[in-house]
Image (spheres, rainbow, N blue to C red):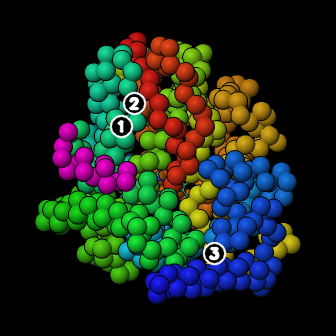
Amino acid sequence: HISGLTLQSFLVFFTVFFMACFVLKRSENLPPYPAGRVPVLGHLLALGRAPHLKLTAWRRQYGDVFTVRMGMEDAVVLNGYTAVKDALVDRSELFASRPPNYMFDAVFGNQKDIGSARWGTEFKQRKRFALTALKNLGMKVGPGSIEEKIREEASCLRNRMTEYEEEPFDVSNDITVAVANVICSMTFGKRYDYGDETFRELGKAIASVMAEIGAGQIFSAFPVLRFVPGINRTCKEVFKQNSKIHRVVWDEITSHRENLDRENPRDFLDFCLLEVEQQGKVEGLTEENVMYMATDLFLGGTDTTTNTLLWSLLYMTLHPDIQNKVQEELDAVVGDSLPALSHRSQLPYVNACLLEVMRIRPVGPFTIPHATTETVKVREYDIPKGTKVLPNLYSLHMDPAYWPDPDRFDPGRFLDAEGNVINKPESFMPFSGGRRVCLGEQLARMELFLFFSTLLQSFTFRTPEGAPPPTTDGVLGLTLAPQPFKLCAILR
Ligand code: HEM
């Protein structure tokens, strides 16, 4: 009887509390809410399983700027090129922070990395340092360069796909492994064999953190759920898998510290550990920061690149004519040699295909949530400092004013009348922009080009005989992924 009473009071308390939160007038002059907001959940039900589609549809109804309520949180959504470019690029610093996020903050040691760090000196110094380190690594040429490491990995991936002997297979496992290995090469200076136990554990842990951390947003929307036994299992699982990633990275940090080559930093960890020793550009950088920054590379660089490559193969199977054009261009320019970055400028159609893939299915359709660093005016609204902001990149890429018939896959959009790739097209920001632009953009572009070219040079990708074509509807977790699909890799 007593526990029944306690439960009853608990329910009454929370119902009253949530109703109060719902009816309380907001003190700020935030943009309006779209219809469909209900007590407690806010717009969560209305947003459904494909929020990128819903928010883009709402733009047509409510304009470029509106507010959505997700549980206990409000987020200002920016839509379309004008509003998003204004915030992310033209007034970048005013929108360059991150809102508190329970899971992210826990996974990254309370902002000890780059991606989750709030706007400020520490973030700026770490990001500048990491960009320079990646650039220096990327500029190396010849054996041991990033380009060579990706080419080696692309060639392993090709061999792996040959083993399926043209039978249907789920391509996502092998691509994830290849992409994670590139991050290993760059961060730790070594790649792993596909069967290596540590590597498989690492891969599983990354996949699991990425899968659960998206669902974990619910713990920011409803903080009380963190304490509800059973429901908070997600948190515990993420923390467990995250500590596995940390263990692998710590082991590498230890062995790098013992063999540090001060004259010739070989990989990202070497660059970071030298900086920890010298304290030159990043004040107070610790090995713990290094561990979290390396975790950023794994979590930021694996799912994104993998899913973009998966989308590219999916669209090739749906458009054999386009696949054929890609292969003709590769045959004419690359022939039988292993594709290299030096071929890139001579392959406009290949480049245009990859750009079109990133337009039609941007894997980070809302960026990582931003937060305002000051009170800012957007249109007629005053958005207070610290407000969560979601730039809807999907709305830019699907805007018929810039991209006629936006649902049609057409690489030709990215070519000018002479057949050259259009430089910096408007309403296109797959890597976001401004101060929070993707740290790995250059690396990702290299990987996409080298993996895609190597695979298309060697295979024709087809839907298995008798199977329905794969759907282009994505699944939105932390990234926008295709639904699992199988294909056949037919040797050319
Ligand atoms: C951030 C896209 C690959 C590391 C981001 C953001 C997007 C993005 C949209 C959010 C930016 C914002 O919040 O405004 C992509 C795409 C990729 C890719 C489409 C591949 C096709 C990579 C790779 C790495 C990486 C390979 C690592 C080497 C990061 C990091 C951030 C980030 C650390 C946080 C940056 C910050 O907070 O300042 N990426 N990314 N990404 N990305 Fe990527």
Which stretch appears magenta?
A: 195-208
Amino acid tagged 1: Asn
Rounded to the nearest angstrom, the CA distance separating label 3 from label 2 is: 39 Å
Mark 3 or mark 2: whose residue is earlier in sequence = 3
Query: Which quadrant of the figure has residue 295?
Result: bottom left
Query: What's the residue type where badge 2 is placed?
Result: Asp
Closer to us: mark 3 or mark 2? 3
Residue 328, given in percent of the width and then of the height, sits at: 52, 14
Mark 2 and mark 1: Cα distance apart in space: 7 Å
Structural crowding at the residue carrying mark 3, measured as other residues with C-alpha within 10 Å and reported as few (<14), some (14–19) or many (≥20) = some
- Judged from the image, the secondary structure of the residue bearing numbered disc 2 is strand
Label 2 with label 1: CB-CB less than 8 Å: yes
Residue for badge 2: 170
Left or right of 14 on screen, residue 304: left
Whether tag 1 and tag 3 are in contact, CB under 8 A, the answer is no
On screen, residue 191 above or below 264: above
| Dot 3 and dot 2 residues touching (CB under 8 Å) | no
Q: Is residue 24 visible?
A: yes
Q: Residue 457: horizontal and vertical position, in percent?
A: 43, 20
How packed is label 2: few (under 14 Cα within 10 Å), some, or many (20 or more)?
A: few
Disc 3 residue type (three-letter): Met
Q: Residue at x 79, y 34 (%)?
A: 404
Would you name the residue on which mark 1 appears?
173
Residue 207 is covered by the magenta coloring: yes
**Front-most of residues 212 and 86:** 212
In the drawing, does residue 243 fall left or right of residue 86?
left
Question: In this figure, which residue is indicated by the disc labeled 3?
Answer: 72
Residue 359's tag is none
Which one is nearer the viewer's eye here, 281 or 79? Answer: 79
